[in-house]
Image (cartoon, rainbow, N blue to C red):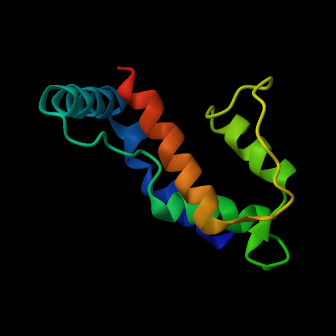
Amino acid sequence: MRHFFLSTRRFSHISEKPRDYLIAVLERLRLAKLTGVSFPFFMDNSNIVAMFEMMDTSGRGSISFVQYKEALKTLGLCTADEVLNDDGHSITLDKFRHEVNRRTQEIWSAF
């Protein structure tokens, strides 16, 4: 829970000037598109780790496939009817982080 608080606290400045924040985000996206540089990730590593740790309540270092799919749906990175292949293995932080970053990159590249 501590990580969740720290992660949400990092974004508290957004509510102070949401218009300025949105303009800055859109400008970064425009520049990334024009220059071909990587698109900015709005969910950084600490946010991904915090989300993973909230799901990994036993501290085993892995989450179930159901938790993984629900997290992707919650983040808007997976549709309800999308078929994901469950290979029978639990999902590690590395796999979760990779998939969140990959899917986020796919979405931003459409803009």
Above or below, comparing residue 39 to residue 50 in the picture: above
In the displayed structure image, the side of residue 39 where residue 67 appears, left or right: right
Q: Is residue 21 visible?
A: yes
Camera-nearest residue between 80 and 3: 80
Above or below, comparing residue 99 to residue 33 in the picture: below
Above or below, comparing residue 67 to residue 58 in the picture: above
Q: Position of residue 2 (x, y in %)?
A: 64, 72
Q: Position of residue 109 (x, y in %)?
A: 36, 28
In the displayed structure image, the side of residue 30 where residue 46 appears, left or right: right
Q: Is residue 4 visible?
A: no
In the displayed structure image, the side of residue 88 where residue 2 appears, left or right: left
The quarter of the picture where the C terminus appears is top left
In the displayed structure image, the side of residue 25 where residue 78 appears, left or right: right
Q: Position of residue 1 (x, y in %)?
A: 70, 68
Q: Position of residue 40 (x, y in %)?
A: 32, 43
Q: How many marks?
A: 0
